[in-house]
Amino acid sequence: MALYEHLFIARPDLTSQQVEALNEQFKTTIANLGGSVGKVEYWGVKSLAYRIKKNRKAHFTLINVDAPPAALAEAERQWSISEDILRFLTIRVEALEDGPSAMLRKRDDDDRGDRGDRGDRGDRGDRGDRGDRSDRRGPGSRPPRPRREEATEGGHI
């Protein structure tokens, strides 16, 4: 059997229990047609890069699947009929990841808040490293432009 990563995004007005029911429906379809489902990762509600069917956010779920192509075709057919599913994507892979996906690792990195050592920034004082800024002109402080002299020979410049 082939190995697949299946990602789907569902409408944002669904509850997490309804998204879990969609996961179970997918698992049942795959199991009935001779496949098996590995890990299921719920990534949560995320903002979309662009509107999809008038939605700006969606529930994201990644599912690892080991199934024959016919089982996946049937599951995708059911997804295309469902009004709760905005989009889905299935990719055939050589091997499935054992640990968390890159999205979950990213979330773990964000939670730690590890931004490195920034040192004592203090109140920043007068910012002496920038030199004396009093001699710099602000916007609108340029001298006026000299007037262009009128052409005297036949109106040519």
Image (cartoon, rainbow, N blue to C red):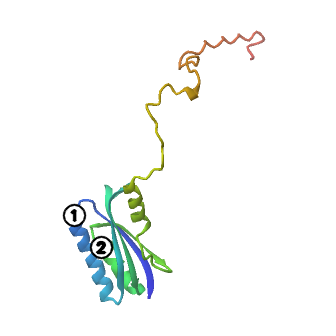
Under tag 2, what secondary structure? Answer: helix
**Residue occupying the point 27% across, 59% down:** 12
Answer few, some or many: residues within 10 Å of disc 2's Cα (few below 14, many 20 plus, some between 14 and 19). few
Q: Circle 1 sits on which residue?
A: 15
Give residue 145's quadrant in the image.
top right
Along the line of sight, the residue nearer the viewer: 104 or 132: 132
Expressed as whole percent of the image width and height from the top left, the position of residue 152 reads 76, 9
Residue toward you, 27 or 82: 27
How far, Cα to Cα, is label 2 from label 1? 20 Å
Residue 34: image location, x then y, percent: 35, 90
The picture places residue 40, in percent across and down from the top left corner, at 34, 74
Image: 70 above or below 58: below
Total number of numbered discs in the rendering: 2
Give SS at disc 1: loop
Is 148 situated above or below 117? above
Among the 4 quarters of the image, the one containing residue 82: bottom left
Is residue 153 positioned above or below 19 on the image?
A: above
Q: Give, as a three-letter code, the residue at label 2.
A: Ile
Q: Nearer the viewer, residue 108 or 71?
A: 108
Quarter holding the N terminus is bottom left
Question: Which kind of residue does numbered mark 1 sit on?
Answer: Thr
Q: Is residue 37 above or below residue 142?
A: below
Residue reaching furthest to the front: 120
The residue depicted at 52 percent of the width and 28 percent of the height is 127
Q: Does residue 108 appear left or right of residue 93 in this picture?
A: left
Does residue 53 appear anywhere in the picture?
no
In this rendering, which labeled residue sits more in front, label 2 or label 1?
1
Q: Nearer the viewer, residue 127 or 45?
A: 127
Q: Which residue is mark 2?
A: 81
